[in-house]
Amino acid sequence: MTPELPALPPDLGAATVYEANGRRGALAPQVRPTTQGFGIVAGRALPLRCAPGDNLAVHRAVAVAEPGDVLMVDGGGILVGHLGDVLAVAALARGVVAIVVDGGVRDVAEVAELGLPVWSTGVAMRGAEKRSPGTVGEPIVCAGARVERGSWIVADDDGVVAVDPADVAAAHAGALRRWQAEEQMKTRLRAGELTLDLLNLRGAIAS
């Protein structure tokens, strides 16, 4: 079993984790949620690489996935249906909490109804081949971000960030500190203070 990863407050999202991780690990902004409104999803990465236009590696990954996994699919940005409703049912049965695809997905309405959060480069009706095994569990580069088994994945409507396993503890602690500081700032703003003062921005105006 892969180790458990830290929990997040319900309103601490991908952008905060990205900032706390030294502004590293963000997937390309083209990777977007196929359905918004799932909130913040976090889990450990199970990386896989598909051959061009092929999704056999996704089937292989579902077969070995563990509860709490996020499938991170390097589909090379190719717009074929790497994921559809059948694979979504299979993934949910294995305890997969989300799927991120650098490539296309289809059956997006059905997948949303199933309750599986999905991020992808785009939507594509064209089906994928099932001929090449690809790789499962080996490090990949998914939409510009390095991902390995056990990377901490945080995703929401803003996008997706991948934190290297060695950096998870520091990124989590930093994200919590940043979140707490921002909550305190919001309280002061509601009391009438200004961001110009709280963020020491007046010097930038003067210069």
Image (tube, rainbow, N blue to C red):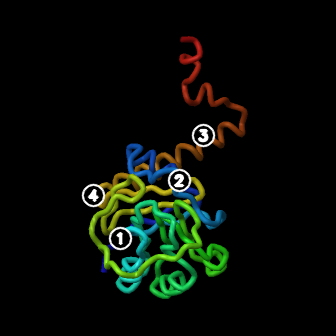
Q: Residues within 10 Å of mark 4 (few under 14, many from 20)?
A: few
Residue 140 seen in this snapshot: yes
Q: Report x, y in % for residue 25.
A: 39, 51
Which of pointers 1 and 2 indicates the residue nearer the eye?
1
Q: Residue at x 40, y 81 (%)?
A: 130
Q: CA distance from mark 4 to mark 3?
A: 30 Å
Q: Residues within 10 Å of mark 1 (few under 14, many from 20)?
A: many
Q: Amino acid at mark 4?
A: Ala
Q: Residues within 10 Å of mark 3 (few under 14, many from 20)?
A: some
Residue 173 seen in this snapshot: no
Q: Give the vertical position of 188 relative to 82 (above or below).
A: above
Mark 1 lies on residue: 51
Q: Determine which of the numbered discs, if any, sits on residue 30 in the image.
A: 2
- Give the mark nearest the N terminus, 3 or 2: 2
| Secondary structure state at the residue bearing disc 1 | loop
Mark 4 lies on residue: 166
Q: In the figure, is residue 69 to the left or right of 157?
A: left
Mark 3 lies on residue: 185
Q: Residue 131 versus residue 15: which sits nearer the camera?
A: 131
Which of pointers 4 and 2 indicates the residue nearer the eye?
2
Q: Report x, y in % for residue 52.
A: 39, 68
Which of pointers 4 and 1 indicates the residue nearer the eye?
1
- Give the mark nearest the N terminus, 4 or 2: 2
Q: CA distance from mark 3 to mark 1?
A: 48 Å
Q: Residue 57 versus residue 157: which sits nearer the camera?
A: 57
Q: Residue at x 59, y 43 (%)?
A: 184
Q: CA distance from mark 4 to mark 2?
A: 27 Å
